DNA sequence: TAGTGGTCTAGACCACAGG
DNA sequence: CTGTGGTCTAGACCACTAC
């Protein structure tokens, strides 16, 4: 069920550098070893070394440029794809005890909005649920999820949604989650949301609609996450000429 | 003042593919040409072709994998570094007429918070301003910016802050903006913010603290952007095994 | 099984930063 | 000027997909 590749050479180099940075062996502002030195140390050609550096650059850990050594920026947190897609994963990673309470779960026909988002005919079955998510017992978000029946929905129905990470389970079952698009907006809490989250109605919340696709671009999931605005921050690190990893932090 | 490199080969290949995708020559779900075909077409080895593909992948335009052709995901918007750092640039890019009104601008001593953020001694001079930003005449955000005196602040003081993009100007003057970290949280509008933005006090707003660094990790700017939550959405596209570019949309 | 992208090697030249 | 990272070539082998 889990094939488990052995790490490639560039991954080992990247991990070595990540460790060295996070462990404080290199302080922010310090120059990294040169590519030539890393080639020697790992008995490698420049290809893997450069791929490792590119990875760290895209994670926002280092800054590179012609003619100068690469420099450590800071030990800022970068989330894995799994942490970005699974609330359980990132809560755990941040050191909080994740919890969840399913309000309801159902197989139901798709309305117009859902059908459009999931690119299925209106009325086709989808699997939906509402869950409240907790960190150390404090409610932090409301999760309103909708899955295509195939391949994910059927597995969701068969899963105990109070027992932990659905997304982790689905990926382990071989569901091909490839990419996610999200948007983020600030809204005022409705009566219902306020009650779930233990805040005053009208309090500022982060609303995050999110769509998960497989590798061929077929949407598998269309969900809304509703975060307490006073508790959660979304972070981003954008580097010139490079893509931007991002992370989520939580204050309790 | 603007050196203007000529494009590298991998950039030409990437641009060719971007054009082909955006122009509809390839629909979402379609396979791209194989790497071998692109090598022939551009009389190139695999290196540049793969670098171009990696770029598009990190922009969220395509999805790749062993054994299969790369597939077009969709023509989703990806912002350049400049658009991410300059409000003027992204408003223009979205087809809106950017506007700004400076409430005040000053050279002043740094308080404890600012000194810590900019990593300078408390009391050292910084340059600060408050601006309200408009899109097609509608107020959409409040900008509270603070710069180190060197190298950016001095240039900010000498610039007409009602005339357009400060960040573009600074970069043209050679200021080394290398990377940005942002966080995002939902807050309720204060009286003052509400008045600036033309909303009710207590309305949900997006608060985005942001810090801009040069290539060596020295913070040059520490600012707060305050967006109307009902008007602006932040978007992200995260691909498995890849970094996440992101974009900002606006509804008017 | 044929074709694909993922990884790696061993060279090369260049642009640029720094002493 | 020396050393650095950025770009490119021309090969090679492998893991995987699709047929």
Image: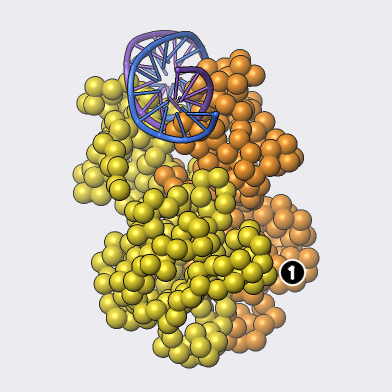
Chain colours: A yellow, B orange, C purple, D blue
Which residue occupies 61% across, 33% down?
Answer: B32
Res B233 → quadrant? bottom right
Quadrant in the picture for residue B86: bottom right
Q: Nearer the viewer, residue B31 or B128?
A: B31
Q: Position of residue B18 (x, y in %)?
A: 65, 37
Position of residue B196 measured from the top left corner of the image (x, y, whole percent): 66, 78
The quarter holding residue A48 reads top left
Percent x, y of residue B132: 66, 70
Q: Is residue B103 left or right of residue A196?
A: right
Residue sitting at x 61%, y 87%: B201
Question: Which residue corresponds to the image point at 34% horizontal and 43% vertical from the top-left?
Answer: A72
**What residue sits right under mark 1 in the picture?**
B252
In the drawing, does residue B94 fall left or right of residue B80? right
Q: Residues within 10 Å of mark 1 (few under 14, many from 20)?
A: few
- A75 left or right of B58? left
Q: Is residue A67 visible?
A: yes
Which chain letter goes with mark 1? B
Residue in the foreground of this view, choosing between B84 and C14: B84
């Amino acid at each position: 069920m889990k094939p488990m590749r052995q790490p490639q050479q560039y991954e080992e180099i990247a991990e070595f550098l990540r460790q060295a940075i996070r462990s404080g062996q290199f302080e922010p502002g310090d120059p990294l070893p040169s590519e030539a030195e890393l080639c020697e140390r790992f008995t490698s050609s420049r290809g893997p070394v450069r791929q490792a550096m590119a990875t760290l650059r895209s994670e926002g850990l280092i800054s590179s440029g012609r003619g100068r050594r690469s420099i450590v920026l800071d030990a800022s947190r970068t989330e894995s794809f799994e942490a970005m897609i699974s609330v359980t994963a990132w809560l755990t990673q941040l050191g909080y005890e994740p919890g969840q309470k399913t309000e309801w779960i159902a197989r139901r026909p798709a309305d117009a909005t859902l059908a459009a988002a999931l690119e299925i005919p209106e009325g086709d079955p989808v699997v939906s649920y509402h869950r409240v998510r907790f960190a150390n017992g404090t409610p932090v978000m409301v999760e309103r999820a909708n899955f295509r029946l195939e391949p994910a929905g059927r597995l969701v129905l068969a899963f105990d949604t109070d027992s932990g990470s659905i997304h982790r389970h689905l990926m382990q079952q071989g569901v091909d989650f490839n990419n996610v698009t999200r948007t983020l907006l600030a809204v005022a809490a409705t009566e219902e949301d306020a009650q779930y989250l233990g805040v005053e109605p009208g309090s500022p919340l982060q609303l995050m609609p999110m769509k998960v696709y497989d590798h061929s671009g077929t949407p598998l999931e269309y969900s809304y996450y509703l975060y307490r605005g006073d508790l959660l921050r979304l972070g981003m690190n954008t580097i010139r000429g490079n893509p931007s990893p991002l992370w989520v932090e939580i204050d309790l």
